[in-house]
Image: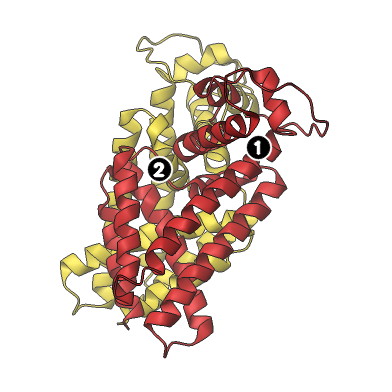
Chain colours: A yellow, B red
Amino acid sequence: MQLTQDKKKRGRPAKSGRDTTQTKAALITSGVEHFTEFGFASSGLDQILKKVSVPKGSFYYYFANKEAFGLAVIAHYDSYFSRKLDSHLKNTQLPVAQRLLSFVDDAKAGIEKYDFNRGCLVGNLEQEVAVLPDSHREKLFLVMQGWQGKISTHLKDICPNVKQDECESLAEFFWIGWEGAVSRCKLVRTTQPIDLFVTHFIKLIEK
Amino acid sequence: MQLTQDKKKRGRPAKSGRDTTQTKAALITSGVEHFTEFGFASSGLDQILKKVSVPKGSFYYYFANKEAFGLAVIAHYDSYFSRKLDSHLKNTQLPVAQRLLSFVDDAKAGIEKYDFNRGCLVGNLEQEVAVLPDSHREKLFLVMQGWQGKISTHLKDICPNVKQDECESLAEFFWIGWEGAVSRCKLVRTTQPIDLFVTHFIKLIEK
């Protein structure tokens, strides 16, 4: 996907029967689907538009340029994934020590649902960050900081005697390993790498 | 990069002054450089050929098709990386407990040398394995098995009391986290993620 720096709003809304908010949301959803499966560079804008029947001429009505589209896709994925994390880590129906495993089971089910073809959008884009605009790098960094904060808070809850900076370090370790495990799941087409990673991670925090 | 399944050998050797062995090696080196920086899908064959001044018509003299080229690039990288690993893990000039850290320092220097733009070829291709031919998936799996075997043997050397299957599991954990850490280095443009990962990994094996 070539990036352009067009700033001027142009194009016209798509005549699809959807209102403009729905069309913009459909474009973002299509972007998430393509980027989680193929990454940014391999995802053609034509395919993303075709999936939701939006003509190319209308794209620029919704997004100033492809860079802005990428940022909107990352923000949407962050919002979805942060809600998923919170729904497990703050689930008072579960004992606190089981909440991380509950998230892990949910994530594994998602990976299996898409037949091991879709990974983590943030992990995919991180891998190809050298060819993305700087704004994407900054956004991905902030998203990862947010996810790390959630795991760090959770670790402090389950291990109150562990110092704050150690919880933050372990949270960073968790996401580094998590992205490696999700990537390995694509290769071996099972969720065993996630199980193996999480088993050792739990041994480490119980240390 | 589109893949073709051409089986028939065609084309002619490049008139570059190099002999055919040198030209084939130059093509593979160019492939490694591009795939470690951009991955397979974002690496145009034209750029790979241009780097070593080989016309497109000559490419098929050296490789049956692009799939065969990809396999040759992976095999070359595996050979280079396995030698690097052995040069540290079997370095009798160093105490056995320092050899893994010696490899880590070497790898970090390589990442810095290329300004955090090049990652691990295997990690890059694993991330985009859904769009690669099945032969690449199988080859990447075997390569990773080989690297895991080397780390497993090393862990058995430094922790003789740890059972064989636990050494193998920890070795798999090492490479899962390693690929995540190398990817994170690209994002943050420092080697701090590798230091953080290795620090916690060592805590785990000392457990």
Question: Disc 2 marks which amino acid?
Answer: Glu
Amino acid of disc 1: Phe
Indicate the quadrant containing the C terminus of chain B: top left, top right, bottom left or bottom right.
Answer: bottom left
Separation (CA) of disc 2 from disc 1: 26 Å
Residue tagged 2: A126
The residue to which callout 1 is attached is B69
In this view of the protein, can residue A70 be seen by the observer? yes
- The answer for which chain carries disc 1 is B
Question: Where in the figure is residue A139, as x and y percent of width and height?
Answer: 31, 38
Q: Which mark is residue B46?
A: none
Helix, strand or loop at label 2? It is helix
Answer whether residue A151 is visible to the viewer in this image.
no
> Which quadrant of the figure contains the N terminus of chain B?
top right
Say which of B19 and B71 sits in front: B19
Q: Is residue B108 left or right of residue B82?
A: left
User: Chain under label 2?
Assistant: A
Residue found at x 72% / y 27%: B60
**Which of the pair A154/B101 is nearer the observer?**
B101
